[in-house]
Image: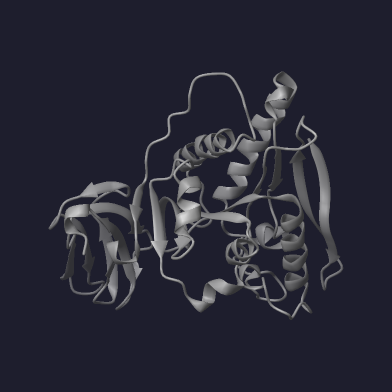
């Protein structure tokens, strides 16, 4: 393994911050492919950091026991927003900026924008395929999924199905995505998958293990790794296009009490949860599935308000528009 610092800068308080990259070179003069894994653009999303730990540990051992397995290059960026990770914050400290909204612009005067620019340039120079790991916010628990902007799905779904996620969600394009890392890498013709799993400031070991197997499978599928052993158990994901996902929202302010588990194939009319009053003992809303499908998002934070998201369901084929 080779370690390199891709960016280094001083914070307004004088602290030196470095963004590290761990690389596993190919045994070939011309690597089959170059795959990069990126974690913690948001410092409160910890699933990716742990997943990078699992990958680095496994690859270091593989490099010692089967060095010939590395037919391509692998680059891992475990913590690209180290200051935000240190305080468990979505935004970069001192600047209150979302680093994943700093890509592709012309204004690189702030330190987060400068580090975003350096990260983007480094990935463009060293990767053919990128996987960008994310977790959800504090309110919603997400099943392991890959989100693809509509229009990119034809080239990305063949890679996404190798990643052992539960769902591939093709969603409509929106202006807000144009400043993200994933969007700008895809525009640069570098196939980039954005994975979301779990919830912020938490670790779900089951999800991490599931995605770890998926990442190894992706490396094997692309020819980056060739290794012996039992085949990986990869389940086919549900694939949902923009009109095939239903969002359930709260109609009231109160407490949401869940009645079922995430990652469930749910039937039409089945109870998902209740919104209850905090003051008078009343059930304000019974939240039921409007159609059959796969429950891939579920409210975790109990405090809700009118319009707050409670659940998302990927519809079964028979209930799709």
The residue sitting at 77% across, 57% down in the picture is 122
Indicate the colouring scheme: one colour
Residue 196: in sight, yes or no? no
Q: Does residue 178 lie above or below 320 as drawn?
A: below
Residue 121 position in % (x across, y down): 76, 62
Residue 163 position in % (x across, y down): 49, 42
Q: Does residue 68 lie above or below 272 as drawn?
A: above
As drawn, is 266 to the left or to the right of 185?
A: left
Instruction: State the residue in front, 144 or 47.
Output: 144
As drawn, is 264 to the left or to the right of 289?
A: right
Residue 23 position in % (x across, y down): 76, 41
Q: Does residue 180 lie above or below 257 as drawn?
A: below
Q: Quadrant of residue 183?
A: bottom right
Residue 321 position in % (x across, y down): 21, 64
As drawn, is 253 to the left or to the right of 219?
A: left
The residue sitting at 22% across, 53% down in the picture is 317
Q: How many marks?
A: 0
The residue sitting at 26% across, 60% down in the picture is 257
Residue 89: in sight, yes or no? yes
As drawn, is 155 to the left or to the right of 297?
A: right
Instruction: State the residue in front, 278 or 79.
Output: 79
The residue sitting at 72% across, 62% down in the picture is 120
Q: Quadrant of the N terminus?
A: top right
């Amino acid at each position: 393994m080779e370690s390199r610092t891709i960016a280094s800068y001083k914070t307004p308080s004088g602290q030196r911050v470095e963004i590290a990259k761990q690389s596993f070179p190919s045994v070939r003069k011309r690597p089959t492919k170059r795959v990069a894994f990126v974690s913690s653009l948001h410092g409160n999303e910890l699933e990716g950091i742990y997943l990078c730990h699992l990958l680095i540990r496994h690859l270091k051992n593989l490099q010692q026991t089967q060095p010939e397995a590395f037919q391509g290059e692998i680059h891992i960026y475990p913590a690209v927003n180290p200051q935000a990770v240190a305080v468990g914050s979505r935004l970069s400290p001192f600047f209150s900026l979302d680093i994943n909204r700093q890509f592709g612009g012309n204004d690189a005067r702030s330190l987060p924008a400068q580090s975003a620019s350096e990260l983007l340039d480094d990935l463009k120079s060293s990767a053919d395929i990128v996987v960008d790991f994310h977790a959800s916010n504090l309110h919603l628990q997400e099943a392991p999924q890959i989100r693809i902007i509509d229009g990119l799905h034809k080239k990305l779904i063949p890679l996404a199905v190798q990643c052992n996620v539960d769902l591939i969600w093709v969603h409509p394009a929106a202006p807000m995505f144009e400043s993200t890392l994933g969007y700008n890498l895809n525009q640069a013709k570098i196939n980039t998958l954005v994975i979301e799993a779990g919830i912020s400031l938490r670790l779900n070991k089951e999800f991490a293990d599931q995605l770890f197997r998926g990442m190894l499978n992706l490396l094997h599928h692309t020819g980056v790794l060739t290794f012996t052993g039992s085949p990986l158990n990869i389940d086919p994901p549900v694939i949902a296009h923009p009109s095939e996902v239903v969002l359930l929202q709260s109609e009231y302010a109160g407490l949401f009490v869940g009645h079922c588990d995430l990652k469930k194939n749910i039937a039409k009319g089945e109870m998902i949860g209740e919104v209850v009053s905090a003051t008078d003992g009343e059930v304000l809303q019974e939240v039921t599935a409007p159609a059959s499908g796969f429950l891939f998002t579920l409210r975790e934070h109990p405090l809700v308000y009118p319009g707050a998201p409670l659940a998302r369901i990927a519809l079964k084929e028979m209930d799709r528009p």
